[in-house]
Image (tube, rainbow, N blue to C red):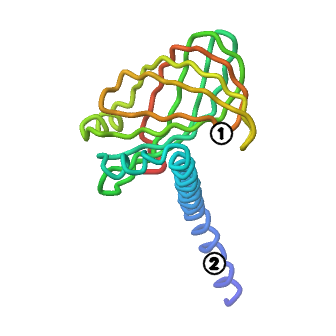
Amino acid sequence: MPTIRLLLSLVVAATAVTFVSPRALAKDKSAEKRAEIHKMRDTVLADLYKERPETKAKIKKAEGYAVFSNVGVNLVFASFAGGRGLVVDRKGHETFMKMGSAGLGIGLGVKDFRAIFIFSDKKKMESFIEKGWDFSGQADAAAKSDDKGGQAAGAATVIPGVEIYQFTKNGLALQATLQGTKYWRDKALN
């Protein structure tokens, strides 16, 4: 009789682990991804404040800001990029997001770049979170590896009420593209 109880207890425990583990693992993965995004945000903002100290005051006064880490690939006449980030409103509410882009133009290379959005208009920030499109023209040249190398970048955007700062972390790229970018909520992390 004790053997049957022990066997039954083991079966119940194994069944419970089977149903609980995938959810627990998913929660752990989500928490890990959120922590990575927070770390990226902190690093990117520190780099931005070092390069452009005036942006710290702008972010404090703003309705919110967003920080994204993106990896882009330029292959002669097409460019592609993807990444993650988050939007933080004035009250500290966070919305985790993904991004993807594709474009046409002349370019060649791979680069790991960061983008910071400063929202001076609350409705523009809310629209960005809900709709997320940015269609922009972009021209840049970058040759950078950690602290070595140089970069030049400029971006024009069709979103009024939003300042965008972009800089290269690592990579080698020369491009001039007309690019469409889609930002959307990350359902797994929100």
Q: Residue at x 68, y 90 (%)?
A: 2
Residue farthest to the bottom? 2
Q: Which mark is residue 169?
A: 1
Q: Which image quadrant: the N terminus?
A: bottom right
Q: Which residue is mark 2?
A: 8
Residue 187 placement (x, y as % from top left): 44, 44
Looking at marks 2 and 1 on the same chain, the residue that comes earlier in the sequence is marked by 2
The answer to which quarter of the image holds residue 141 is top right
Percent of width and height locating residue 90: 30, 52
What residue is drawn where x is 35% and y is 57%? 92
Q: In this orientation, which residue lies closer to the viewer: 22 or 165?
A: 165
Residue 51: name its quadrant: top right
Please rate how many residues cluster around mark 2, counting C-alpha atoms within 10 Å: few if below 14, some from 14 to 19, many from 20. few
Identify which residue, 33 or 123, lies in the foreground: 123
Q: Quadrant of residue 9?
A: bottom right
Secondary structure type for disc 1:
strand
